[in-house]
Amino acid sequence: MNQLEFQRRRERLMAIIGPESVAVIFGADEVLRNADTHFRFRQNSDFFYLTGFTEPNAILVLTPGREEGEVTLFLNPRDPAIEQWVGRRLGPEQASDRLGVDVAIDINEVDKKLPILFANRHSLHTLWTAQSRFDERVHKWLHQLKKQRKSAPEQIMNLSLSLHELRLKKSMLEQHTMRRAAEITAQAHIRAMKSCKPGLYEWELDAEIQSEFLAHGAHAPAYPSIVAGGENACIMHYVDNSAQLTDGALVLIDAGCEFEHYAADVTRTFPVSGMFSREQRALYEVVLAAQKAAIAVARPGNCFKDPHEASQRKLVEGLIDLGIIKEDLDTVIEKHLDRKFLVHGCSHWLGLDVHDVGAASHKGKSRVLEDGMVLTIEPGAYIPSNDTTKEVDVKWHGIGIRIEDDVLITADGNEVLTSGAPKHPDEIESLMHG
Ligand code: GLY
Ligand code: MN
Ligand code: MN
């Protein structure tokens, strides 16, 4: 992604917050795993969105209209002794050239130089974290200014509303990157289908998936991959991936790569042996019909909830037809009897994060879909063999099926970014039989 793209994003955000405001956006910190070993660093998505900068320990400050520069980046300084251990750093000297920021300052000077940027600004915009409303550094700097009797912003506002609104609609470059993440992910699912056979362990399919991601420059999964054989598919966040795959069972794989910071999120469910049983295929076709119905209504002008409602209706009708649910459609919907089998919604936004930011509703109303938004369509039906399903014929027990694709809303409908991964049962069977 080029410098101009990030510059455009900052400009758009500054136009929204206005010249009375200052915005402070913190990059992610390194997280210690143990001793002197850290978890693999992943930049904070909001910070990345505005900078493209992938080093830890950085802070971006936006001061719209400021003559000395509107965009200030605090970052780690160059240090050959440290860089020999932790890798190359960009350093303030090169930051302007490489990132297009106006001013770049050594992060060690942040307490002295950052609060100066608050001067004569009425509002301070920053992102509220889940743990505390603001980063405690913001409080410290404001307190510092007060003690020095200097002007400080009077109100602190949550930047997420405006910033996440921008992130919700993907630019051409973002769409291009997400298309690539989707293609790599589709190839990985194909590879898992082709290499699957009874007796393998779930982690062996996980290895095929990961290997395909890495082979195409996607450094990591966008979320922990789920490889769930048989009844494990009925556990939504099954990430053990430790069981043996048995002949006659299905395996559900929910895995997506992160490519250049953008996520794909795909689920395919297929028979370990390469051939669906009668019951597996019957339930699979219900989920597939539900997914198709949902994709058909994922279009501009419709709402975020429309795919969910379309798929839910199809799923319930299908479960009634198969005799898994024994009430009529209206009763099921009214009494939420489907919740036993349909445990999650059909969609979430997708982008830099797998469960991406952006409001799915506004003032109680479902969000209208627009060109450039990307969402998943992922209906599923799960019939675990436990007390809650004892009235269901045992032939259905232990079946869990989800089919998930990534869908870009376009001006005249949608584009299924992950259509490269087969999902029709005949297609899957023929692929698995070579
Ligand atoms: N892989 C997480 C999800 O499907 O939402
Ligand atoms: Mn998903
Ligand atoms: Mn998923």
Image (tube, helix red, strand yellow):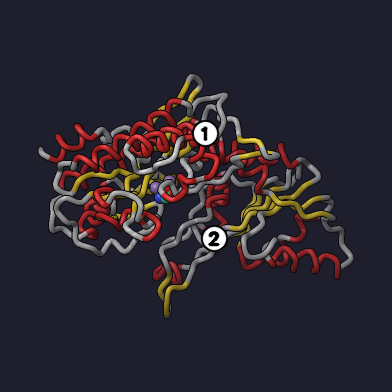
Q: Is residue 113 left or right of residue 8?
A: right
| The quadrant where residue 426 appears | top left
Residue wearing tag 2: 28
Q: Is residue 322 above or below residue 415?
A: below
Specify the amino acid type for callout 2: Ala
Q: Residue 83, position in %: x, y?
A: 43, 67
The furthest residue to the top: 412
Q: Is residue 424 above or below residue 73?
A: above
Look at the numbered disc 2 and give the secondary structure of its residue. loop
Specify the amino acid type for callout 1: Met
The furthest residue to the left: 434
Q: Which residue corresponds to the image point at 85% horizontal and 55% vertical from the top-left? A: 154
Q: Which residue corresponds to the image point at 51% horizontal and 51% vertical from the top-left? A: 53
Q: How crowded is the residue under tag 2: few (<14 C-alpha within 10 Å), some, or many (20+)?
A: many
| The quadrant where residue 232 appears | bottom left
In terms of depth relative to the viewer, which is nearer, 110 or 274?
A: 274
C-alpha span from label 1 to label 2: 25 Å
Task: Indicate which disc, 1 or 2, sits on the residue closer to the N terminus.
Answer: 2
Foreground tag (1 vs 2): 1
Q: Quadrant of the C terminus?
A: top left
Q: Is residue 306 visible?
A: yes
